[in-house]
Amino acid sequence: MRASGDPYLQHCVETAALLAELGAGPPVIAAGLLHDTVDDAGLDYGSISEQFGAGVADLVKGVSNLSHLSKLARRNDTASRTDEADRLRTVFLAMEDARAVLIKLADRLHNMRTLDSLPKIKQQCFAKETLEIFAPLANQLGILNWKEQLENLCFKHLYPEQYEELSSNLHEFYNRDMIAAAIRRLEQALQVRGLSYRSISGRHKSIYSIYSKMTRKKLDMDEIYDVHGVRVILENKADCFTTLEVVHHLWPRIPGKFKDYVSSPKSNGYDHAKYCYAMYQSLHTVVLSEETLPLEIQIRTADMHLQAEFGIAAHWRYKEGCETLHTDHPSPPGLGSSPRATCTFPSDSDGCPFSYSKQCDHTGPILVILLENEKMSVQELPQNSKILDLLKRASSYDMQLSLRLNSHAVHNLHQELKMGDVLELIPSTPCKSGGYMRELNQMSDHRLAVSQS
Ligand SMILES: Nc1nc2c(ncn2[C@@H]2O[C@H](COP(=O)(O)OP(=O)(O)OP(=O)(O)O)[C@@H](O)[C@H]2O)c(=O)[nH]1
Ligand SMILES: Nc1ncnc2c1ncn2[C@@H]1O[C@H](COP(=O)(O)OP(=O)(O)OP(=O)(O)O)[C@@H](O)[C@H]1O
């Protein structure tokens, strides 16, 4: 039974259903159904592998590893330390098949939907971790719909009064029909003008995004002009300016809200990886709809859009500085040429071009997890660092320890660490004499001598 009183199986089925809705294949859906069997039903890798295949068993094990680290992160309040939370997200993506991360996200989304039945303190703890770690992870993987749902649920639990107030205002304010009507009107006007466009899409801003913008910019709700938005993607720059004319002809403009980031691109700061400035290009205007509500209209070419969504001016970077994968927002027709423009759901780990290891040139530092006395830290080390280098950062110097790297006993302290490795320090008997580091060094020198002889 779950705390809500629902049969436990319901959580497993809902998790699998979320993955199916996303377009996941049978192994991922099966692993979604079985995701808690290692931790909560005492099944081991072998029996899952025997019944469902090694692929499914690997995924279930991967989710279990992520759950274990997530639990430690909650206990250590990692979410409160922004840098460490950032690093943990990178490690999550690096240590497991990206599909295991998706299953963990589906699991978390369902848990967040049913959080009401847990004690208040646990609700807050889960919501905090979800907001700092899992919602940005969903964003990094491009599952924007899950990201918004997670953020909205966190907002509800972390700031219930503000949530209630804003959601009752928005209940009156959100107008989905208006967006659809505006798109239709604009499509017709563009056709009359003989302008061909790649796509016109619309969205209303999520409640958490509105709240964040209000707090970030110290604004009232009626000062947020992009609650309702439409985006037009066209062939070339000239068409963008013609479309702007059409828009301003259709609706009265709200003064002071026009921004020409096409003639004067917006700099998003220096991109150290690419040695250049990240530039964002788009025309933005806010008009007054027939319903007398502000409507933000963004106009850009397909190239500008690719740059905004996937290039160095990318929306994820603009928001939080991470990687992205758009699975639930298919790219507009004709935008398929970029390697980042579309992503079908990967059928295996190698098939996923968005896993950290595939994208990274491995010249930068590595991030690894150090577990000692149930304490978890995410450590950044230079390339080619060894287990010994990591041990120098451990606080439990005076104990005899057994070491496990990614759940396997460590035999060579000079073994090189790689991105996403998890090193566990397991205290056995208290150390009687001598410093811990000296013993470790002796032990490793001895092992090295033996292995070389
Ligand atoms: N990808 C990307 N999108 C951006 C960037 N800057 C702005 N945007 C998008 O453009 C929208 C409007 O940005 P601006 O016109 O600069 O206005 P604003 O910051 O929202 O401020 P207001 O005028 O108060 O609405 C944002 O909500 C984003 O959707 C950027 O650098 N990269
Ligand atoms: N006018 C618009 N039309 C269509 N899609 C939009 C429009 N404005 C933003 N979007 C898209 O909607 C999603 C959510 O945007 P949201 O408004 O929450 O954040 P944002 O664009 O970063 O804004 P801000 O920084 O102003 O809060 C993003 O994928 C964004 O690209």
Image (cartoon, grey):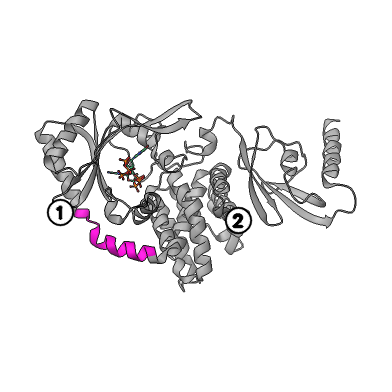
Q: Position of residue 2 (x, y in %)?
A: 50, 70
Instruction: Specify start and end residues of the magenta stretch as a single range.
Output: 162-177
Residue at 38%, 48% (x, y): give it: 144
Looking at the image, can residue 50 be seen? no
Q: Badge 1 is on which residue?
A: 291
Kind of residue indicated by mark 2: His
Element type where label 2 sits in the image:
helix
Q: Is mark 2 within 8 Å of ligand 2?
A: no
Element type where label 1 sits in the image:
loop
Kind of residue indicated by mark 1: Glu
Main secondary structure along the magenta-highlighted residues: helix
- Looking at the image, is 394 positioned above or below residue 356? below
* Mark 2, other Cα within 10 Å: few <14 / some 14–19 / many ≥20: few
* Nearer to the camera, 301 or 427: 301
Q: Residue furthest right?
A: 433
Image depth: mark 1 or mark 2 in front? 1
Task: Tell me where residue 298 sits by quadrant.
Answer: top left
- Looking at the image, is 83 positioned above or below residue 47? above
Q: Position of residue 441 (x, y in %)?
A: 83, 40
- Looking at the image, is 216 positioned above or below residue 360? below
Which numbered disc covers residue 68? 2
Gap between marks 1 and 2 measured at Cα: 51 Å
